[in-house]
Amino acid sequence: MNPHASRRGSVVGQAEAGQMPGGGRGEGRRVRDEGGPSAANAMTRRSFVTCSALMAGVLAGISGCSDGSKTDKKTKFFHRCPSWPAPGSPKTPVWPVSFPGFQSTLSLSGSWLIGGGSDQAIWLREARTGRLRWRKVAEKVVDLPNGGDLRHPYVTVASKGQILAGGGDGYLADEVTALCAADGKQMWRQRIPGGGVGEIYASGEFVFVGTSEKVFALSAQTGKMRWQLEVPETARLSMHGDMLICTHTGVEPFGVMGLDRETGKVRWHEKFSDASSVEVAVLDDMVHIVVARFAEELQESGARVFVTALGEVCTLLADSGRLRWRQAAMLTTGSLGKEGFLYMQTDDQLVALRSGTGEVAWVVQFSELDGNSQLEIHDEILFATRSNLSGHEPSLRALDPVTGEERWRAKDEKLSTIMPGPPGMILANPEGDKVFAIDTMGGEEIWSSPLRGPVRAVSGDAIYCHDGEEISVYDVTTGDPFYG
């Protein structure tokens, strides 16, 4: 058992503003996307809206999808797939909206909110108003235990006018499907041998799928299988140039691989024996790998406890896997890479290394960390929280990320977990019944409000929450219900 398993994991490689943070294993894994509505798609939408305004009644029965290769003779008007829906006229928000599903299936992409409920259907809503644009009913509803409730929901991700979904224990358990974001029509469907889809990562012309046994590369346009590679328990996928970075942590030894995205050929593979966790940050042209190890120790009382053992930081050149530098240290979990620095934790210190050389930039004695700190950078400030999991008084420190100088400190249980908000604000206690908006410059409270459900995302002037039954949206400036 990992003694730090209850703490929040690495925040390296956070999703961009407006995307949903990933859930735990019980609620599906993280999903990531690249891209949004393009200029070309915007022009298509404008054309479609113009035609709709002139012939609204005629289009009701003849509009549809086209891949752009040819025009259906029976369809006078069409949009190209993949594409995003045509922007609608401003309407009154309808929040809150019913959503009896898992929060990990929610995905926010630009102006659109995507989700998949416990009814195994997939839908798209306007992120601003909550109005439903389309709902794709499950092709078949798989009978599930415990009254038909999903224990492991499928993964959803939006990318370049496509909605990708797969995995879970419903009808998509052993496949990935692509829906056109404009109307929800299916573009393609691909069976994944062995099932166990844990991660979907879209990049350019590829859709990469990680399972408990393999990594698959699919064509984003057709779903055709491009290649597959046996990789035990894929934990994370990311991209650097033409290199797919794959982290695997299910079977010893844990490791990180660099794969040619076109062929799946392994360019390099770094393995770590007896690792308890492996965290990866890709900065500039380097892959930084932070490895923590814990060992069981027998106490005088006869009890066995886990203690921090010797870990390491390994930095490789992303294209070749050649070692740039390596350092051994007594590391705990929870690292962060940002703008030329790696921030790591030991049992009693917060350490900043220069990412290019491994040189120590600064060290802050932080005896109360005890491996339970969350690290975030927002407004060019490094925030380090301390939970009360190990009997310490909870607190939040704001540090200069370059020098380690403390700017302010606050001690309060509500500050033990945080989420970046808009400029000038962080949200504290985002998983709790009452959320606090904190000024990043001085630590003062801006507002506090009981929100319905954990915060899932902050985008623009809206906070999105989900309590398992409904999605509620609040004004980020006041904490009041959002009415547009």
Image (cartoon, helix red, strand yellow):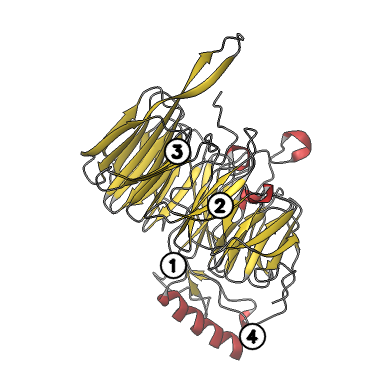
Q: Which of 215 and 74 is in front in this view?
A: 215
Packing grade of label 4 (10 A; few <14, some 14-19, many >=20) is few
Quadrant of the image occupied by residue 8: top right
- For mark 4, what is the residue? 56
Give whichever of discs 4 and 2 has the lower sequence position: 2
Where residue 392 appears, as percent x and y from the top left, is 63, 37
Which one is in front in this view, the residue at disc 4 or the one at disc 3? 3
CB under 8 Å between discs 4 and 3: no
Question: Where does label 3 land, which residue?
Answer: 349
Mark 3 and mark 2: Cα distance apart in space = 27 Å
- Identify residue for label 2: 21
Query: Is there any visible trace of residue 261 in the rendered image?
Result: no
Query: Residue type at mark 4?
Result: Ala
Amino acid identity at mark 3: Gln
- Residue 25 visible in rendering: yes
Secondary structure beneath dot 4 equals helix
The x and y percentages for residue 293 are 43, 26
Residue 209 point in image, percent of width and height: 44, 44
